[in-house]
Image (cartoon, rainbow, N blue to C red):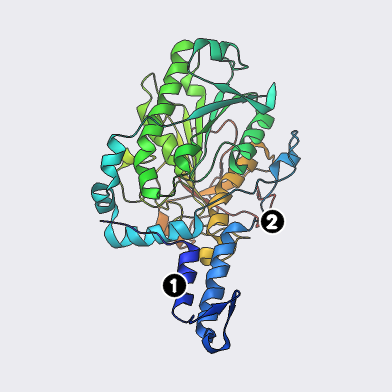
Amino acid sequence: MKVTFFSFHSIVGAVTATTHRSVQLGRLNSASMLPKSSYFLIFILLIIFFAGLLPNKRRPILYNRLTFNYTEESSSWYCDDVFFNVLKKHINTYGDSEITKEHSFWQELSSAEPANISFHLFTRQNPTISQRLVPTVQSVESSFFNDSRPTRVIVHGFCNCQHSDFCQSVKDALLYANDVNIISIDWSDTAGLLDYILLRLRLDQVAASLAGFVDFLHNTTNLDLSQLHLVGHSLGAHLAGLSGKRVTSGRVGAIIGLDPAGPLFSSRDPKSRLDGTDAAYVEVIHTNGGTLGMYDPIGTADFYPNGGKHQPGCLPWIFGMSCSHGRAWELYAESVYTPVGFKAVPCDTVQQIEGSVCRIDLPTVDMGGEPVNKTKSGLFVLSTNSRFPYARG
């Protein structure tokens, strides 16, 4: 089965081609003016397209509130809005298994070269300029890596890199809150693939590379795997889970899954996505469930801020998908250092969360945090503010 994706320009071109008869010097002749209905459709498409490109002014610039000198958000954030929406339409039509089993990229995948992945170390000694690590003893010994400190691995997602807002913000928050080794991985050569299905199929290769590096650190240093946490957003959350499955030297201490990607994962076997058994403790924060993210509980503890589907302060419907999807890492980054805390109440079922019928008189637990409390389990719901600071306590 062949899945075809259309760019914004091709969609607009298809709409306008039916009504254009001639164009001179970039202007329509009066005899071939577009009907009003076509203008309206193009207007709607423009709104959808640019809603995903414009930066979210409500998104906090966490770097300014910490101790490091970042003043602007990078211009690259998400490629997911329209792309994931179109992909999800195909998934709902054909099902996950048919796409993955019959997709022509299976043959290409089997002969593909190992994933290109790099590892970048940050510590309080080098909070802004990373040291690149390779799996050699000399590389580790000549760096600021200290195996007596806890280690946090940050895993970016689709169409992203280790310079993204997510990686930088979470890195800075963790270093502010705790004296840890931060290893930010960069798998952008694979994450930048425009064919999401091919990217999904190659995810196992990236996971094998990350797991191999974790095993190397454990076997060549005194790294305590119980103090190793993987923090992944979107596709990176599943990558963290797949890596945790493949670590052979022990069990990873914790995985923090920030709105794990939904397309091609929601109905898949737990062996092919993030699961509560991938680490000693798995915490999942759902903020755009059912659209770009997963809604089903898949962790040891699953948190549903504001119901887990749409976040306050984001535009409604598909216009705010990226905003809601990215809110997961914003909330987590704030949870790492805020004294207020994100207090959540337990729920028995997802249906209770959807119906807003969870009891509010039960003892609360904190979402996120550094180090994360690994005794939490079950489903939890909480409310946040619509803009930074999000924590209500």
Q: Residue furthest bottom?
A: 31
Is 143 in front, or is 353? 143
SS under mark 2: loop
Residue at horizontal 47%, vertical 82%? 19
Residue at horizontal 28%, vertical 36%? 110
Residue at horizontal 40%, vertical 49%? 196
Residue 264, percent across and down? 35, 50
Is 186 in front, or is 189? 189
Residue 321, percent across and down? 52, 59
In the rendered view, would you say 35 is above or below 278? below
Residue 93, percent across and down? 30, 62
**Identity of the amino acid at label 2?**
Lys
Q: Is residue 329 left or right of residue 195?
A: right
Q: Earlier in the sequence, mark 1 or mark 2?
A: 1
Mark 1 lies on residue: 14
| The disc label shown at residue 57, or none | 2
> Residue 369 appears in which quarter of the rendering?
top right
> Residue 24 appears in which quarter of the rendering?
bottom right
Residue 87, percent across and down? 39, 57
**Identity of the amino acid at label 1?**
Ala
For label 2, the crowd category at 10 Å Cα-Cα, with few meaning under 14, some 14 to 19 and many 20 or more, is few
Residue 308 visible at all? no
